[in-house]
Image: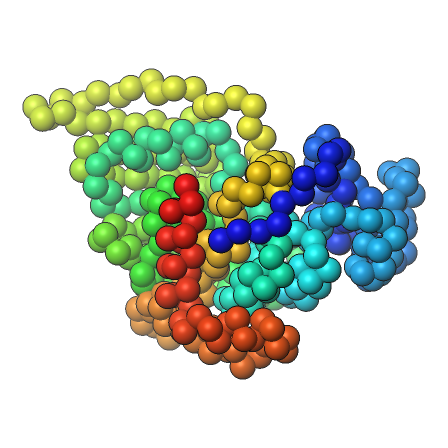
Amino acid sequence: MSFATIDAEGPIRVVLVGAGNMGRHWLDVIAQTPEITLVGIVDLDLELAQRTVAERRLTVSVGASLAEVVNASTAQAVIDVTVPPAHHAVNTEALFLGLPVLCEKPIAPTVADALSLIAAEEVSGQLLMTSQSRRYYPALAELREFVGTLGEIGAVTTEFFKAPHFGGFRDEMDHPLLVDMAIHAFDVARYLLHADPVAVDCRTFNPSWSWYRGDAAATAVFEFADGARYTFTGSWCSPGLETSWNGSWRISGALGSATWDGEGRPTVEYVDDAGGASRPTGAAPSEGGRSEIAGALDEWVHALRTGSVPSGDVHANVFSLAMVEGAVRSAETLRRVSVDEVLDDAYAIALEAERRSDVRAALAAWGSARAHLVDQEARVAAAG
């Protein structure tokens, strides 16, 4: 795949869409990033946007319309920090205004919407990347290197146990843990294994003391094509001895095992032919790379300058979203669910729901979602 790059000298001019709590967090990171400059803020709550600009003493365009702010500010790119249900509309509008987008996770609330966005990216020729921010930890990169030395991987496990009292919409969700949080761990599993799952078996429940309406605890087992299994087990109402927000990880391979507590450096142990064990110190995590959303922002800027396909491009990220949707479907139907089933159903929905004729024509030309995604993956690999 290819997309338009930004060759003009000077910082990339961006408009931030969304002035809420997460938007303010992004403003802090933008201010610390000399490669970009903020030229506009968009929010349907115009008073909130104006108050944010005044509090931070910003000199930028402000409005409730993305198109108006883009025209007033000569923006070159968009950062979408709206609520997930708004992502499809905002991303699509930005792409067809001729602007690349960096979007907060999830890239869309459904796999069907994500497939529509893939087609919109291809038709518009602009990059759409999601900020899958948990990928950007030096310790995680080190763990990935260790995984590559363990031989054939048999099992990967994540334990995630926290007890956050958010209040608001999460307390009312049917599957708060799976839908709002687990995509981070699911995406990291794909990152560590350099692979995508083929099926999932998931069960959820809600402890009697839970303050969530929906199921706040889950165990999901994903099967990968090479036979590896990834198990996620966790709870969002588990006080005491809590894990990190990244969870606790263990990877078991033919030549040894690696672990990571989600915060410090990973450890690895190899077993030699005589049954003895050796534990290397490992190289220190690389310096200079920023973590979390700052790391995602840096990769986006690099992609826009060079044309290199980022790891969070919507084509690749759709599989992380499919893991969530497949896990929810498995929990609700009490059966094993294939990822192809999720993709096929989403593809049919996307074709039926698409309102832009050019995007619908692009979708129809795929034949199937899986075939198209595999083809695009092969093109990216061939391009280096």
Image check: 225 left or right of 233? left
- In this rendering, the answer to whether 170 lies above or below 75 is below
**Residue closest to the far left:** 274
Q: Position of residue 29 (x, y in %)?
A: 70, 36
Image check: 338 left or right of 57? left
Colour scheme used in the picture? rainbow
Q: Position of residue 241 (x, y in %)?
A: 46, 39
Q: 338 and 372: which one is in front?
A: 372
Image check: 326 left or right of 257? right
Image check: 85 left or right of 321? right
- In this rendering, the answer to whether 235 lies above or below 245 is below
Q: 173 and 326: which one is in front?
A: 326
Q: Quadrant of residue 360?
A: bottom right
Q: Quadrant of residue 120?
A: bottom right
Quadrant of image for the C terminus:
top left
Residue at image point 63% right, 45% down: 5
Q: Position of residue 186 (x, y in %)?
A: 43, 51
Q: Position of residue 277 (x, y in %)?
A: 18, 23
Residue at image point 17% right, 27% down: 271
Residue at image point 61% right, 77% down: 357
